[in-house]
Amino acid sequence: MPILEYEALEVALPGMARPILDGVSLSVAEGEAVALVGESGSGKSVTARAALGLLPAGARVGGQVRVGGAELIGADADTVRAVRTGKASMIFQDPRAGINPVRRVGDFLTEQLRLVGGRSKAEAEARVLELLGAVGLPDPPRHLRQYPHQMSGGMLQRVMIAGALTADPRLLLCDEPTTALDVTTQAEIMAILRRLQREKGLGLLLITHDLDLAAATCDRIYVMYAGRIVETGTAAELLAAPRHPYTAGLLGSSPPLHGELTRLVPIPGSPMSLAQSAPGCAFFDRCHFAQPGRCDQAAPPLAPLGAGMVACHRVDELANSAAQEIR
Amino acid sequence: MTTDPGLLLQVSGLRKTYPSGGATVVAVDDLSFSLRPGGALGIVGESGSGKTTTARMLVGLERPDQGEILVQGTPLAARVRGRTARLARAKAVQIVFQDPYLSLDGRISIGDTLDGVLRLHGSPSGADRAARVRELLAQVGLGDREAAALPRQLSGGQRQRAAIARALAVEPAVLVLDEAVSALDVSVQAQVLNLLSDIRRDTGIGLVFVSHDLAVVRYVCDEALVMYRGRTVEHQPVTDLLSMPQHPYTRLLLASVPRPDWDPEAIGEQRRDLVAADALVP
């Protein structure tokens, strides 16, 4: 059973030319690591926040979001609180933005256990020491007494992961958890997240702009563009044989570390803003394969293809040739 | 140091320290390298490696404690006094930051910004300047619409191109790029990377490309220098650095780049072992 399930989620702000999210369907099973990949403004963070019942103020919302079977769209405050305090936790890009700088790390970590979990100070501290050890911090008793500014970004991100675990969630939502960190630290944080997912059977939703990181750490990948899922499949397949021109374009845009070095083929133009809309495929203006009169008429539906799904009018023609040539 | 006017840039024995509490932090220690005309050097490192301090010393935003920076055989003055010296410094080295707002005035259109740079550097005729502004913008793939726009009316990629055009307007000998493509979306980053390789090919300008991203350094540069806690741990042609990394830290950096058979657990262990053995500091 999926721990997280979106069905045709729609989020629109009044006065904007297009919805922020336009029919997003996605699922994460227990013990599964899933990545949602997209560029800035694609709607990936809004999608993740919706799983905690956090939606932009004043937005018109449609569709469904279920966490562990509990429906969040239109839910009452108790349901939302139950999800946030017991089923799902979120880890953000900047650990310093989510912790009070004038309070000790220990106070931050034990707060929820004492206030929501009703545990005594000693019980809460014992639990937190255990969690700090589990995220690989070298000296848990000392870290409890430290202030956030006394820790490096990588250490503090571990504190935030420990904080996310105090609620014993079944689902971890990770919004660019390593983007602000050094590459060697990124590897350590991803190792911790993957171990938690495997050993505790947590569902993991990784929000990232980095297709290579997604493929290296997750089982399945959803690629998002302008508020829609444009392609989904297993990490291995998606990386080896991207079917959507946007996915192929993303891969063609990152220079390789090894192998032959040819001139990059960038995706022309820039991602669509909320002030722009298109009657047809949102990628039309930037697509090397766009066919006027066809691709700009109606939005392509997300349709099954092999083991995955692709939203492209020309996917059958491009499947085995052109879309992959860009790589 | 022997002065070779044939070299664009010669850096020798550069050192910079900062006081921190009662102690002294060595940000950059004994850094030396040189750059041929048309050459491109990548400076690679993580936070605290000293790569940004190096970039700032190259443009004179920080004064080195020791060491020398020669641009086309002439020492970069430690102190710049007066208009002539300031213009000469600007002609020697220009910089593009990660955040283009640091070098663009939010209240002035891109075209006027470029025009101001040209006027300052002695292009008297308005018609000449207008033609040169168009030429500079065309070089970075921008047109009349972008020339009339304020920085905030452009997309992130366009704004970074405008910052590059502003730096090129001075016709500097050396262009320093400090994480200049890191904040851009992948699809847009590729456009700017192609632009940088075209500029290199067409102008013979020297590039110092500061980045944490080895793949991007490989694409733009022919040499790379890896820094760790202020020290140079390795300096090699990029191809050799990637295929035969000599220093354990370079190998760790390479292993850390995500790829399909990635094993982040092993990388974490490797890093802890290296730190414990103190094997990273040269």
Image: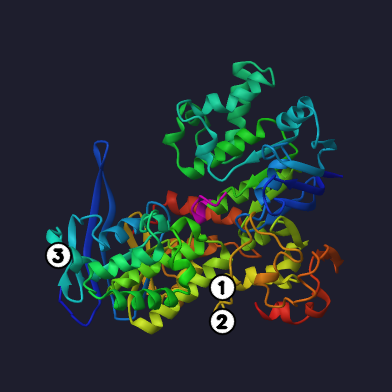
Residue B260 relative to residue A1: left or right: left
Q: Nearer the viewer, mark 3 or mark 2?
A: 3
Q: Secondary structure at mark 3?
A: helix
Q: Chain of mark 1?
A: A
* Residue A186: image tag: none
Q: In this figure, which residue is indicated by the disc labeled 1?
A: A256
Q: Secondary structure at mark 2?
A: loop
Q: Nearer the viewer, residue A127 or B212?
A: B212
x and y percentages locating residue B143 in the rendered image: 47, 73
Q: Secondary structure at mark 1?
A: loop
Q: Is residue A179 magenta?
A: yes
Residue A16 relative to residue A229: left or right: left
x and y percentages locating residue A132 in the rendered image: 57, 34
Q: Amino acid at mark 1?
A: Pro
For the N terminus of chain B, the quadrant is bottom left
Judge the density around disc 1: few (<14), some (14-19), many (≥20) Cα neighbours within 10 Å. Answer: some
